């Protein structure tokens, strides 16, 4: 990946991860837990949310992470329901952000009949950054809803089950290695196990359409 491509990716990744984690913190706070707020996570400042190693993994390996938002279960009124709501807040924020960015792409397209006829490089860069950011946020939405620990989808999935704590912990311990194995095989063996790219393209087509 060259430096120009990295610069195209960075805005979408940073905005997506920041909004994602902020929404986890905001939802937890609204449900009665101030842990994330007390830790300084109830903010849209990327520095509070971005994990440098996780960011580098996203850029160069195609998957990574941000600093996880913590909450105290004892402060929640309905633990299983509220845990699911907190988990869902992150991916749903990426879906909304992706849709809004698609509107930005459509606005650029509608202003110019052909992106290659823009009067200057600025508009080409703007189009690419908005388009890339939208696809990244749709990817974060889809990826984080997978019911594999430690992803948000696993918290939502487990909240709907009445599993013993010990059983959940056993599943969580094998979740990360399984997830990494799937991603490594998919990225380097060119085998589609989780069709994230296909789903991203469908969402992009749905909200942008042909141009």
Image (cartoon, rainbow, N blue to C red):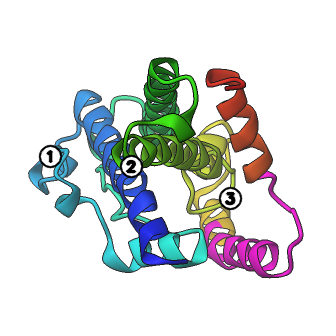
Would residue 154 be found to the left or right of residue 53 on screen? right
Residue 210 shows in this picture:
yes
Q: CA distance from mark 1 to mark 2?
A: 41 Å
Give SS at disc 1: helix
- What segment carries the magenta color? 172-195
- Compared with residue 140, is residue 207 higher up or lower down, i.e. above or below? above
Assess whether mark 3 and mark 1 are in contact (beta carbons under 8 angstroms): no
Q: Horizontal and vertical percent for residue 83?
A: 45, 40
Q: Residue at horizontal 62%, vertical 23%?
A: 207
Give SS at disc 3: loop
> Earlier along the polypeptide chain: callout 1 or callout 3?
1
> Earlier along the polypeptide chain: callout 2 or callout 3?
2
Q: Residue at horizontal 81%, vertical 52%?
A: 195
Q: Main secondary structure of the magenta part?
A: helix
Which corner quadrant of the image does residue 162 belong to?
top right
Q: CA distance from mark 2 to mark 3?
A: 42 Å
- Compared with residue 92, is residue 90 higher up or lower down, i.e. above or below? below
Residue 110 or 162: which is nearer the viewer?
A: 110
Residue picked out by circle 1? 37
Residue 102 or 180: which is nearer the viewer?
A: 102
Residue picked out by circle 3? 148
Would residue 4 be found to the left or right of residue 184 on screen? left
For mark 1, does the 10 Å Cα neighbourhood hold few (<14), some (14 to 19), or many (20 or more) residues? some
Residue 14 or 39: which is nearer the viewer?
A: 14
Residue picked out by circle 2? 121
Residue 48 is inside the magenta segment? no
Q: Horizontal and vertical percent for residue 115?
A: 54, 36
Q: Residue at horizontal 58%, vertical 30%?
A: 114
Q: Horizontal and vertical percent for residue 193?
A: 86, 62
């Amino acid at each position: 990946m060259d430096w120009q491509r990295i610069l195209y990716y960075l805005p979408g990744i940073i905005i997506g991860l920041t909004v994602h984690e902020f929404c986890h913190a905001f939802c937890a706070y609204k449900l009665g837990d101030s842990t994330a707020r007390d830790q300084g996570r109830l903010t849209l400042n990327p520095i509070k949310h971005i994990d440098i190693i996780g960011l580098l993994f996203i850029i160069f390996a195609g998957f990574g992470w941000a600093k996880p938002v913590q909450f105290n279960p004892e402060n929640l009124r309905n633990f299983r329901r509220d845990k699911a709501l907190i988990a869902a807040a992150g991916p749903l924020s990426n879906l909304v952000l992706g849709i809004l960015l698609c509107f930005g792409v459509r606005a650029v397209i509608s202003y110019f009949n052909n992106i290659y006829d823009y009067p200057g490089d600025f508009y080409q860069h703007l189009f690419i950054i908005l388009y890339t950011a939208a696809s990244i946020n749709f990817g974060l939405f889809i990826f984080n809803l997978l019911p594999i620990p430690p992803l948000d989808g696993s918290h939502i999935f487990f909240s709907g089950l009445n599993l013993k704590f010990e059983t959940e912990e056993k599943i969580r311990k094998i979740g990360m290695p399984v997830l990494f194995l799937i991603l490594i095989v998919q990225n380097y063996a060119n085998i589609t196990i989780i069709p994230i790219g296909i789903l991203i393209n469908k969402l992009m087509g749905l909200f942008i359409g042909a141009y």
